[in-house]
Amino acid sequence: MTQSRSDFEARLRQIGAERYHDLHPFHDLLHGGGCTPDQVRAWVLNRYYYQHTIPMKDAAFMSRVESPELRRAWRSRIEDHDGTSENEGGIRRWLRLAEAVGLDPDYVASRRGVLPATKFACDAYVRFVRDKTLLEAVASSLTELFAPKIHANRIEGLLRNYDFADDSSLSYFRNRLKEAPKDVAFGLAWVLDHADTQEKQDAAADALIFKTDVLWSQLDALWGAYVEPGRIPPGGWVPGTGLLLQRAS
C-alpha cells in the first residue's frame, strides 16, 4: 500500500536513524579524540576519494536528465565541490584539511594509498547513480538529511581534541552546514513528489539504504586497516608515506 507523504518521509528518516554512519564506532573514536595522528590521516586520505567521487556522481546523474529545470537545480552540487571563481569548493577545502593533518595535498589528490574497499564503495555509488532510475539516484543522495548533525559533532569534537583543528582546516564542514540544507530540501521534495506508488517508494527506500551501506563500508575498511586488527591491504596507505615533511626534504 502506498504510504502517505508524511509516513514515507518518516520511513526515510528512520533509515538514517538506524543505518547512518554516525553510528559507526570509528566516528566515536575520531570525535572523542581517540584517534592517533595516523588514524586521522588515514581517514582524511580515504575520505578524499569519496569527495573526489561526488561531483563525478552528480555529473553522471545530470548527463541523463532531460529537464533543464532539474539540471539547473542539481548543477550547484558540482559547483559546491569543484568550486567556481567565487567559491574555492569542497575538494580544495578538503585538501586544506589534509595539509593541516600533515599530509602532502598533492599525494592525497593523486589518490594513491586509498583502500580497495573505499574505491569499490565509491565507484559503486557512481555506477548506481548512472544506471538506476532518476528517482533512485536522487533518493540515494538523501543521506544529506542526516549530515548536519554529524558535521556539527565533528567540528565540536575535532576542535576540542586535536591541535590541527581550526577555522581553516575545518572549513569544509562549516560550509557544508550552509550548503547541505538547500540540497536536502530540494532532493527530499523531489523524491516525495515522484515516489507516488508503493513500488517507487520501496525503490527509493532501498536506494537510501544502499547509500548508507556505501558510507558504512568505508568506515569498516578504515577500522580493519588502521584500528583493529590493523591489517593494511596491498596498496593501502602506509603510515609515514605521503607526508608534507617528505615533500619538504
Image: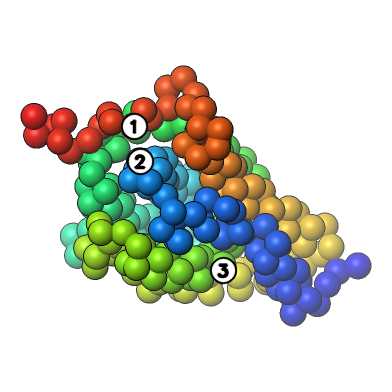
Number of residues whose C-alpha sits closer than 10 Å to that of mark 2, classed few (under 14), some (14–19) or many (20 or more)? some
Residue 95, given in percent of the width and then of the height, sits at 26, 48
Amino acid type, label 1: Pro
Q: Residue at x 72, y 68 (%)?
A: 14
* Quadrant of the rendered image containing residue 50: top left
Q: Inspect this view and state whether residue 59 appears.
A: no
Tell whether 180 sits left or right of 130. Answer: left
Identify the residue under disc 3.
Answer: 145
* Quadrant of the rendered image containing residue 16: bottom right
Q: In this rendering, is residue 111 above or below 164? A: above
Q: Count how many numbered circles sit on residues in the image.
A: 3
Residue 133, given in percent of the width and then of the height, sits at 66, 49
Q: Residue at x 83, y 72 (%)?
A: 3
Marks 3/2: CA distance?
30 Å
The quarter of the rendered structure image containing the N terminus is bottom right
Amino acid type, label 2: Asp
Mark 1: which secondary structure? loop
Which mark is drawn over residue 38?
A: 2
Mark positioned earlier in the residue sequence (2 or 1): 2
Q: In this rendering, is residue 126 above or below 100? A: above
Q: Residue at the right extreme? A: 1
Is the C-beta separation of discs 2 and 1 under 8 Å? yes
Q: Residue at x 35, y 41 (%)?
A: 38
Residue 228, given in percent of the width and then of the height, sits at 55, 37
Looking at this view, is 145 or 169 the one in front?
169
The quarter of the rendered structure image containing the C terminus is top left
Number of residues whose C-alpha sits closer than 10 Å to that of mark 3, classed few (under 14), some (14–19) or many (20 or more)? some
